[in-house]
């Protein structure tokens, strides 16, 4: 009788080992690029705020009326025109710096709440929202002269 040669291919154990290695490599890559779950939340929140600021500017230009984007730092809530509103994640530090003339109220409330007002010509009162955690984070900058909204990592040039 002839001895039968083993069939070419991979064993189940070899296939499982390759799948485990691929999964581990993907998990490491995701953690390295996203900065973990809190980093992903901060980035998503910063992108959302930047989009709402751009919407507010576009509405001011198209309507011919000044429009306000209101941020409450203490409650981590924002309010944009047309009833748009949202919450920022409870993770990390949240700071807003804006034109003192545009701050709502006086005293401690002025530090806790602020507005960015967009004008019909596209200009704005300007400001910066910083979402930071674990040594990293995102800045959302609004240029006062042009009203341009920029999103960038903390430490990067805008």
Image: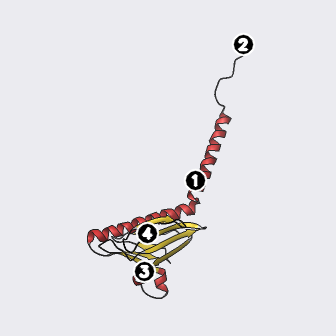
Q: Quadrant of residue 60?
A: bottom left
* Label 1 element class: helix
In this figure, which residue is indicated by the disc labeled 4? 86
Cβ atoms at labels 3 and 4 below 8 Å apart: no
Look at the picture and state if 87 lies above or below 18: below
- Neighbour class for label 4 at 10 Å: few (<14), some, many (≥20)? some
Q: Earlier in the sequence, mark 1 or mark 2?
A: 2
Say which of marks 1 and 3 sits in front.
Answer: 3
- Neighbour class for label 2 at 10 Å: few (<14), some, many (≥20)? few
Residue found 46% across the figure and 84% down from its top = 110
In this figure, which residue is indicated by the disc labeled 3? 99
In this figure, which residue is indicated by the disc labeled 1? 30
70 or 33: nearer the viewer: 33
Look at the picture and state if 41 lies above or below 93: above
Q: CA distance from mark 4 to mark 2?
A: 75 Å
Say which of marks 4 and 1 sits in front.
Answer: 1
* Label 4 element class: strand
């Amino acid at each position: 009788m002839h001895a039968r040669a083993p069939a070419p291919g991979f064993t189940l154990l070899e296939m499982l080992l390759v799948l485990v290695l691929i999964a581990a490599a993907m998990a490491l890559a995701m953690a390295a690029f996203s900065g973990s779950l809190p980093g992903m939340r901060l980035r998503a929140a910063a992108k959302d705020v930047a989009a709402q600021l751009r919407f507010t500017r576009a509405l001011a230009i198209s309507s011919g009326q000044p429009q306000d984007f209101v941020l409450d730092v203490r409650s981590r809530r924002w309010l944009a025109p047309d009833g748009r509103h949202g919450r920022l994640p409870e993770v990390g530090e949240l700071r807003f710096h804006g034109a003192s003339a545009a701050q709502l109220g006086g005293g401690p409330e002025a530090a806790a709440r602020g507005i960015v007002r967009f004008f019909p010509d596209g200009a704005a009162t300007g400001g910066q929202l910083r979402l930071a955690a674990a040594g990293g984070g995102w800045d959302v900058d609004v240029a006062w002269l042009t009203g341009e909204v920029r999103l960038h990592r903390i430490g990067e040039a805008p």
